[in-house]
Amino acid sequence: MAKPRIHRLPAVVLTIVGLLAAGHISATLAFTGPNTPLKESLQPTLNSYFRGPLDQGWSLFAPAPYSKDEYMVVRACLSEYDVCAGGADAGAELTPWRNVTEDEFAEIDYNIFADRGARQSKVMHGRFWSAASNLTGEQQTTAEGNHIDGEPVFGVDLYSSEAEETYSSSQLSNLRRYQRLEDAAVGLGSLYMYEDYGDEVTLVEVRMLREAVPPFSKRRDPSAELSQSWLNIGWRPATEFDEEVYAAWS
């Protein structure tokens, strides 16, 4: 009675391996294929599967070594919304800009076992910059404006039927990807501001900076001027998190 079971075991194993291989190949084709509404809906799961916690950036090897430094900077408003909207001239209490990427790099220097958390803003910068670059000039201007009234940044819920009627599938895919990454950037910036200022934080503003790396011959020249490029996320309500997130962050 045991022999048939032994004979069936290789078939079961081969079937499982075949299903796993087919699933992996299908996921790879979806991940590397063109943007479609189906891929858009699967993107968070695909990112989780292929990137995970050990996402590797290959820019160092292809097409060329890094030629610029990348930083994420953030500040907060500690006043009520209506006061913040008027800016410092209206009495809004604004914090100094915090370069969170430099703070994270300080944990990496001379520490080969630094936690992956010390690279969050660097990864965030690269993905956000790519998504923002796919927007039209008008859409970028809209995203850089202040949106503190709870209305969608682009004036419509991007997952609604109205959005599908307003934008082409490719435009909608770009906008949804941008919105996901903007939300992530604002959330990360909010956590840093909560860390510094606690529950007083009401709004956050995020900027992404790219600064050219000087040529080797000028790296010790204090007068060398470095070209800079910025992408801005205007004022947004600080992201609210549950206690488990705060506990993990701290």
Image (cartoon, rainbow, N blue to C red):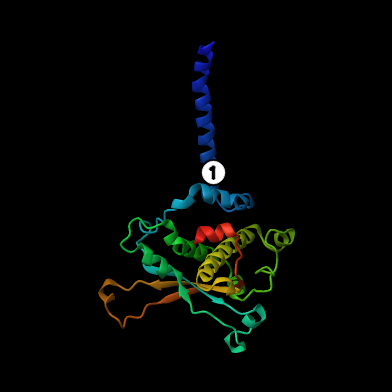
Assess disc 1: are there few (<14), some (14-19) or many (≥20) residues with their C-alpha within 10 Å of its C-alpha.
Answer: some
Of residue 56 and residue 237, the one placed in the foreground of this image is 237
- Up the image or down, 14 lies above or below 217; here it is above
- Up the image or down, 202 lies above or below 223; here it is above
Q: Is residue 248 visible?
A: yes
- Up the image or down, 244 lies above or below 81; here it is above
Residue 157 rendering spot, x and y as whole percentages: 70, 63
Q: Amino acid at mark 1?
A: Ala
- Up the image or down, 141 lies above or below 132; here it is below
Q: Which quadrant holds residue 136?
A: bottom right
Q: Which residue is mark 1?
A: 27
Q: Which quadrant holds residue 149?
A: bottom right
Residue that lies at the very extreme toward the top in this rendered image: 1
Q: Is residue 201 visible?
A: no
Residue that lies at the very extreme toward the bottom in this rendered image: 89
Q: Residue at x 33, y 60 (%)?
A: 111
Quadrant placement of the N terminus: top right
Residue 128 rendering spot, x and y as whole percentages: 52, 64
- From the viewer's perspective, tell me whether residue 91 is left or right of residue 112: right
Residue 25 rendering spot, x and y as whole percentages: 51, 40
Of residue 123 and residue 130, the one placed in the foreground of this image is 123
